[in-house]
Image (tube, rainbow, N blue to C red):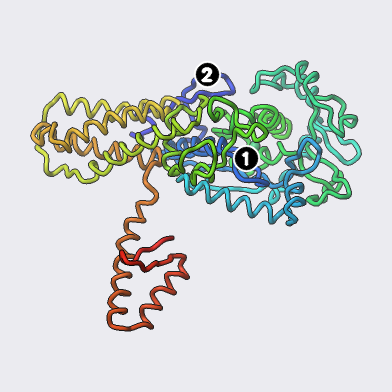
Amino acid sequence: MKKYEKYPLYINNSLHRKKEKFEPLKAPHVGMYVCGPTVYNDVHLGNCRTFVSFDVMYRYLMHLGYQVRYIRNITDVGHLMDTGEDKMAERARLEQLEPMEIAQKYTRRFHHIMSLMNTLPPSIEPAASGHIPEQIQMVQAILDNGLAYEVNGSVYFDTKKYNEESGNYGQLSGRVLEELFSETRTLKNQDEKRDPADFAIWMKATDGHIMKWRSPWSKGFPGWHLECSAMSTKYLGKTFDIHGGGADLKFPHHENEIAQNVGACKVAPANYWIHTNMLLMNGKKMSKSDGNTITPEELMDGNNEHVSQGYDPMTIRFFFLQAHYSSTLDLSDHALQAASKGYQRLMNALKIAKNLRPEDYPAQGDAELDDKIQDQHDRCYLEMSNDFNTAKTLAVLFEMAGVLNDIDSGQIKTKQISSEAIKMLTNTFTVFLEDVLGLEKVQESSSKLDDVMQILLEIRQTARAEKNWALSDQVRDQLAEAGIKIKDSKEGTSYSL
Ligand SMILES: [Zn+2]
C-alpha cells in the first residue's frame, strides 16, 4: 500500500473554495505548475515564502510516493509596467545592460536565495523567452476558435464572448464581468480593445521596444499571462493536477490563464488551484514607498532597520512554516527571535534522535509510551495530509522533541521504551524535519569543513616549523583560490570563507 493511499491528501482547492480529496489524473504521476519570478529585480521576501510553501508541497507529495513533475517558470518577457514598458527592458535601460543580461543576473540571484532557503530545484524551469513559438501557436488556436481578434498587429482575447460561451470568466477570483468594466484602468491601447475586460495575448512592438519576435500578426511579444498557459500545456498536458501561485496572482493572471487554456484547448488547465497568502511586516503590508520592506538578503545579514540581527536562512524557513500557507504571516524581529529559539530546540532534539540506537532498547516497553509515539507518528501524516498543515505538523514535532529530551535526560528510562518505538520516533522526527519540511541544517557540511581545515592548517603548521615555506605558501595560496582565507594571529591560525 502506497503512503498516499494510507494517508489520503486533502487540498483546499481555490477553484471551488473548498477542501477536496486529491485525486491525480494518473497516479502515481502528479503534474504541478507554479508561477515563478519575473527576473528584473531581486526576489521579494513574500515570494520566497510562496516558493518555500510549494517546495514543502513538492517534498510531501514525493514523500507520499507520488512521482511529481514540478514546473516553475521564469518570466523574462512580456510583463509590462503601468507605463507600457516591459519590466525587463526598463531595468536593462536603468542598469545599461542587455535585457537577457538582466534576466540571467536576477535568475542567478534568485537561484542563490532559493538554495540558501533549501528549496529543491523544480523538474523543469522554462523561461518565457525560450517558448515564443509555443505562445504564437496558442494565440493562433484561440483565434481559430473565434475567441480573439486582431487589431493593428495586436491580438486581444475576447473576454465577453468567452464568458457567453463558457459562462465561467471570473470563476477563480469570484469577480463578474460587469465589475471588471468599472475597474479596468485606462491603458494606452484601450481604444483597440472591443471591451475594457479584453486583454492582449500578442502585442505589436513599438519601434523602441527591444524584446520582439516575428509572428503572423506583427513583430511583437506575447502578453504576460500567455507564457504560463503555453508552458504548462507543453510540459504537463492540456489538463494537469495542481496549479499554484501567490494569492495576488488570482486576478488577472490566473483567471486569464484559465480563459486562454479553455480558449485554445477547450478544456480547463488544472484540477486543483492552490494560493499562498501574503507576508506582512510589523502588521502592515510590505511596501517600498513606506519603507516597510526588507529583502531576503537584508534579513539574512541583518542589514536593515527592521531587524536587530541577521537570521539564518533555516530560521526564516522555519518561521514561514510555523503558519499555514493560506494564512497571512506577520514578520517582526520579535517573531524571528522566537523562531530562532524554536528552531534551535528542534535541532537539539534532532541531534539526540540521530544518536539513539534502537538496538540499545528492549523488545517490550511501556505500552502507554509506545502508543504515544505511534499517535505522534500518525498525526504528522494526518496534519500534512490535511492541506499541508505545516503549523500543526511542527506542533507535533515539538511534542516529539519533548520525548527525545526526556530520553536524553533519563526521565524516560531505557527499559520503558521499546526498540520499535525508538525506531519510529527517530525515523519520523528526522524524516519530517529534514525531508518533508526541508529544515535540515544546510551548514551541516561546514562542521566537516572544519575537520578538513584543521588537518590542512596542521600540515601548514608543520611545514612552517620545518621552514618548508614553499609548502606552507602553497597551502595558503590554493585555499585562497578556493575562496578560503587564512589568518595567522597570536591566538593561532583561523580561516574564513
Ligand atoms: Zn503564471
* SS at badge 2: strand
Residue 62 on image: x %, y %: 42, 40
Please tell me which of labels 1 and 2 falls first in the chain: 2
Q: Is residue 89 left or right of residue 322?
A: right
Residue 302 on image: x %, y %: 49, 43
For label 2, the crowd category at 10 Å Cα-Cα, with few meaning under 14, some 14 to 19 and many 20 or more, is few
Q: Residue at x 47, y 38 (%)?
A: 308
Mark 1 or mark 2, which is nearer to you?
2
Q: Is residue 274 visible?
A: no
Q: Is residue 401 left or right of residue 164?
A: left
Identity, as a three-letter code, of the amino acid under mark 1: Ser
Reading the image, the residue beneath label 1 is 232
Residue 402 on image: x %, y %: 24, 31
Q: In this rendering, is residue 468 above or below 62?
A: below
Is the residue at mark 1 in contact range of ligand 1, meaning its CB lies under 8 Å from it?
no
Residue 235 on image: x %, y %: 60, 44
Quarter holding ligand 1: top right
Q: In this rendering, is residue 457 above or below 227?
A: below
Reading the image, the residue beneath label 2 is 18
| Residue 459 location, quadrant | bottom left
| Residue 376 location, quadrant | top left
Q: Residue at x 82, y 33 (%)?
A: 156
The answer to which of 269 and 46 lies nearer the viewer is: 46
Identity, as a three-letter code, of the amino acid under mark 2: Lys
For label 1, the crowd category at 10 Å Cα-Cα, with few meaning under 14, some 14 to 19 and many 20 or more, is many
* SS at badge 1: helix
Q: Which quarter shows the C terminus?
A: bottom left
Q: Residue at x 53, y 51 (%)?
A: 112
